[in-house]
Amino acid sequence: MPASTPPNRPPRERRPQQPERAADDFEPLDQAHRASLAMLETFKRLVAHLDEQGLDVTAEQLAAEVLAFFDGPGRQHHEDEERLVFPELVSLGDAELQAHVRRLRQDHHWIEQDWRELAPHVRAVAAGYNGHELPLLQAALPVFEALLRDHIALEERVAYPAARRVRAAAAARRMTAA
């Protein structure tokens, strides 16, 4: 027999539904930044190892890790930002945010260009070939690292917080409309 409301008690007011606590949808982006910084350290270890030990199995393994990351998740991360984060920031019409997004997009281009210069050398090491130029890697890696670190800092300091605010405001509007 179904429970009913006792006659002396008024019916309960309908409570607004609480959204399930969704994981922060920026967490995968934040994880990608942490992975990028870790992979820069692996890349630096690779270059130092090549300088100190030359081409060996350890160098091949380090190179394979670097190659897999920057050809895969590192590249995909930038595509995700271009598709999922930047458009909503541009749509706000805020000139300063739009300038930051232009810079971040330009950074993505430069990061890709730098990687295209570095990748054949890393690929050669991963394959066990001496077809790499250590002086080029030693000169180019600090430039690549500085660009990537500066880019991540701008995203984490400006772009992600702004996008989080946009998404929080949209979620609040949905909650009040429900």
Image (spheres, grey):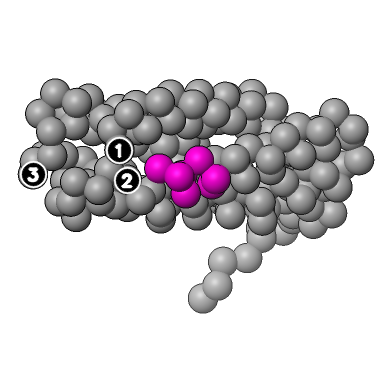
What kind of residue is marked 1? Glu
Give the quadrant of the C terminus: bottom right
Q: CA distance from mark 3 to mark 1?
A: 18 Å
Front-most of 19 and 39?
39
Residue 160 in sight from this viewpoint: no
Q: Which residue is mark 3?
A: 57
- Asked if the stretch drawn in magenta spans residue 113, the answer is yes
Q: Is residue 131 left or right of residue 113?
A: left
- For marks 3 and 2 on the same chain, the one whose residue lies earlier in the sequence: 3
- Asked if the stretch drawn in magenta spans residue 103, the answer is no
**Vertical placement of 8 versus 155: above or below?**
below
Point 82% across, 44% down: residue: 90
Q: Point out residue 40 in the picture as x, y percentages from the top left corner.
A: 36, 31
Q: Identify the main secondary structure in magenta.
A: helix
- Front label number (3 vs 1): 1
Choose top left, top right, bottom left or bottom right for residue 164. top right
Q: Are marks 2 and 1 in contact (CB under 8 Å)?
A: yes
Q: Secondary structure at mark 2?
A: helix
- Dot 1 alpha-carbon crowd within 10 angstroms: few under 14, some 14 to 19, many 20 or more: some
Choose top left, top right, bottom left or bottom right for residue 43. top left
Boundaries of the magenta span:
112-118
Q: Is residue 131 left or right of residue 144?
A: left
Residue with the most extreme bottom position: 1
Q: Secondary structure at mark 1?
A: loop
- Front label number (2 vs 1): 1
Point 66% across, 51% down: residue: 82
Image mark for residue 172: none
What kind of residue is marked 3? Val
Q: Point out residue 142 in the picture as x, y percentages from the top left corner.
A: 43, 24
